[in-house]
Image (tube, grey):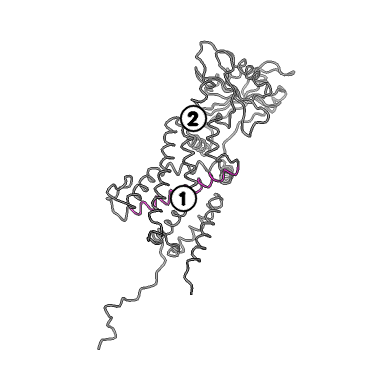
Amino acid sequence: MTSTTDVHPAVDPPRPPRRRHATWAALRPLVVRLHFYAGILVAPFLLVAAATGLLYAASFQIENVVYRHELTAPVSQTTVPLSEQVAAARQALPEGKVTAVRPAAEPGLTTRVLLDVPNLPESTQMAVFVDPGTGQVRGTLESYGGSGALPVRAWISDLHRRLQLGEPGRIYSELAASWLWVVALGGLALWLSRRRRNGPRLGLFTPDRAATGLRRTLSWHGSVGLWALLGLLFLSATGLTWSKYAGANIDELRTAFGWATPSISTDLGEHAGHTGHTGHAASGGQVGNTADVGIDKITQAAASWRLSGPLEIVPPGEPGAAYVVKEIRKTAPTRLDQLAFDPASGQVVGELRFADYPLAAKLTEWGIDAHMGLLFGLANQIVLAAIAAGLIALIVLGYRMWWRRRPTRGFGRPYPRGGWRGLHWGLVAPLALLAVVAGYYLPLMGISLAAFLAIDVLLGLRTRPAG
């Protein structure tokens, strides 16, 4: 006869109810499942963005080769006045209105005269390339946007940004940029936790070459992701700044905090009585009954104010407006100073120095230029290409892991549902708030996240046992 206090050795004592706890052990299943969903469903968009971005990284070299005749000219000991170069461009396209002039920045390059011509697509102008030594026109090409992308680079840029689908195509790139930072940070957390479990023998930045099969693939996936992490976060942040929906929200925030990029005023105000000209005043001389000192003297005045090339000179587009001379050097060190000149006197009536930009505006400018491969020239483009190639490798390795662990091979469900139930409410609440805020400012991510959750719930209801 046994005592009532005896316990049969084959019977386990009753387990206490599972407590909610705010630990990584509870959070990890949720991160794993989010990383899995984003990797499977958003990765195709990321793959397209990476492939087209890799092509865009080489677009500058492609452009220089394809349009070598238009972009370059024989080095000459003499230079035709800029006003005569503008006149030659206007003669080549008499139906156009001069909107900007970019003098040859160094010997061997051509002067680019931009003209607004009817029936061109939005943000597109015609560029006339003039030999500064002879004043002869070497060709005309469409020029897109502020970067002056010529047709081949503009086509590649539109492929990367909109898949050549117009405004609807922007959804793909914004969706990719919205999820990229989530996937990258989730992967970082999972990789660091795996190293903590496996001890210091597992390198952070190098794959485990002794591993085989799935472990080897995971090892490469994690180490490549860690090398590419900062680049992926950078591309996500800068890509969102010019997206359609998230970009508009970011602009509102920048404006609210006074971080918007400043612009120089072209309104002459009290000097308006001295003007009355149109954009055709760029060649100088007399326009109607109003004197204009001309683009040659404006260029000389800009040089005396220490503006240096490459420059863009914007003639007055309407009565009461000023000439604007801009530095357009995007490479580091950046030179983006601007001056406004009274066309009647050639006197400076406005000044905007890049040094006076708010810090956030400077960071935005540098970030976008680096994203486009402009800030550090060829080195910048090589880094962008490496990041794009790394992202492609990550996606391929990720799909390979999913394929090796697919349920049809008997692995079951590697990413179980309901991971959030093990979290303490003190962690669930801020995570939910973070998701709501992120979804508000990044609406495409919010909509797709809601779709993921709905699909997950429906699949859970479908597989739930009856009874």
The dot on residue 60 is 2
Q: Secondary structure at mark 2?
A: helix
Is 285 situated above or below 270? above
The dot on residue 64 is none
Is 442 situated above or below 148? below
Q: Nearer the viewer, residue 313 or 75?
A: 75
Q: Secondary structure at mark 1?
A: helix
Residue 168 in magenta stretch: yes
Q: Residue extending furthest bottom?
A: 1
Q: Which residues are magenta?
A: 167-194
In three-dimensional space, the C-alpha distance between marks 1 and 2, rounded to whole angstroms, equals: 30 Å
Number of numbered labels in the structure image = 2
The residue type indicated by label 2 comes to: Phe
Q: Residue at (48%, 57%) from the top-left corner?
A: 431
Classify mark 2: residues with Cα within 10 Å, few (<14), some (14-19) or many (20+): many
Q: Residue extending furthest left?
A: 1
**Quadrant in the rendering for residue 278:** top right
Instruction: Where is residue 254? Give x, y as percent.
Output: 56, 42
Residue 375 in magenta stretch: no
Is 404 situated above or below 371? below
| Position of residue 319 in the picture relative to residue 309 (left or right) | right
The residue type indicated by label 1 comes to: Val
Mark toward the start of the polypeptide (1 vs 2): 2
User: Mark 1 = which residue?
Assistant: 182
Q: Nearer the viewer, residue 94 or 23?
A: 94
Q: Residue at (60%, 44%) from the top-left corner?
A: 168
